[in-house]
Amino acid sequence: MKLFYSPASPYVRKVVACAIARDIDRQIERLPTNPHASPPDLLAANPLSKVPCLVTEDGLALFDSPVICEYLDSVGVAAPLFPPTGGARLRALKYQAMADGILDAAVLRRMEAQRPAEDARSAAAARQKDAVARTLAALEVDPPHPSVDIGSISVACALGYLDFRFDHEPWRSNCPRLAAWFAEFATEPCIADTVPREAR
């Protein structure tokens, strides 16, 4: 398998964390990619020019991260990260959606912050900030469980991205239960080994 990736992408982190959790990360060749430059090899696999993009051994190109993670869950013999049915599956998928929503809002805010200030952009950034705050509050009321699944991995990656890009906006003081969960879950190898770093 081949993975088009950027080391600072939180969506890439989620994919790599899932691969580590399933002990298949050594089966993946990582291809450093700048999606903003729209390189031809990435465009040939993903016309959206986004990372992560995984090319399977059969040559099938997969994107976005939820699709890639679900595919990785079918590779190897480790315990599934996606519960098969029922309430456990729905709960895990709910946490993944909440985490991806945090990431979507946070990434958009960061992109907007790099552009000239305008009233409309400021209002859009404030809306995204509020969305993150509300979702953190919901996670504080009902944190993920300590077991490793797609929901808990996703939330950990989202919180890690907030620490990485928005460390000037500390969230832990308002979310002590969530902070305690994250402190414990961050010791899982799939999270500890994928701490985000600035793209080189």
Image (tube, rainbow, N blue to C red):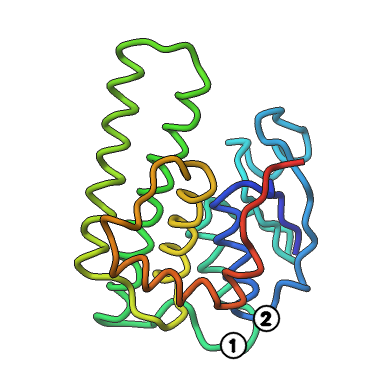
Task: From the viewer's perspective, tell me whether residue 75 is left or right of residue 167.
Answer: right
* Depicted 183 relative to depicted 164: above or below: below
Q: How many marks?
A: 2
**Residue 188 lies in what quarter of the image?**
bottom right
Packing grade of label 2 (10 A; few <14, some 14-19, many >=20) is: some
Of residue 95 and residue 193, the one placed in the foreground of this image is 193
Q: Viewed as shown, does residue 181 lie left or right of 41?
A: left
Residue highlighted by disc 2: 23
SS under mark 1: loop
User: Residue 10: x percent and y percent?
Assistant: 55, 51
Q: In which quadrant of the rendered image does the C terminus lie?
A: top right
192 sits left or right of 139 in the view: right
Toward the viewer: 124 or 60?
124
Asked if disc 1 and disc 2 are in contact, CB closer than 8 Å, the reply is yes
- Local SS, label 2: loop
**What kind of residue is marked 1?**
Ala
Q: Quadrant of residue 18?
A: bottom right
Marks 1 and 2, Cα distance to the nearest angstrom? 7 Å
> Relative to 184, is 198 above or below?
above
x then y, percent, for residue 86: 26, 82
> x%, y% of residue 44?
72, 39
Please state which amino acid type lies under the numbered disc 2: Asp
Residue lying at 31% horizontally and 37% vertically, measured from the top left: 129
Screen quadrant of the N terminus: bottom right
Say which residue label 1 marks: 78
For the point 42% across and 69% down, the residue is 182
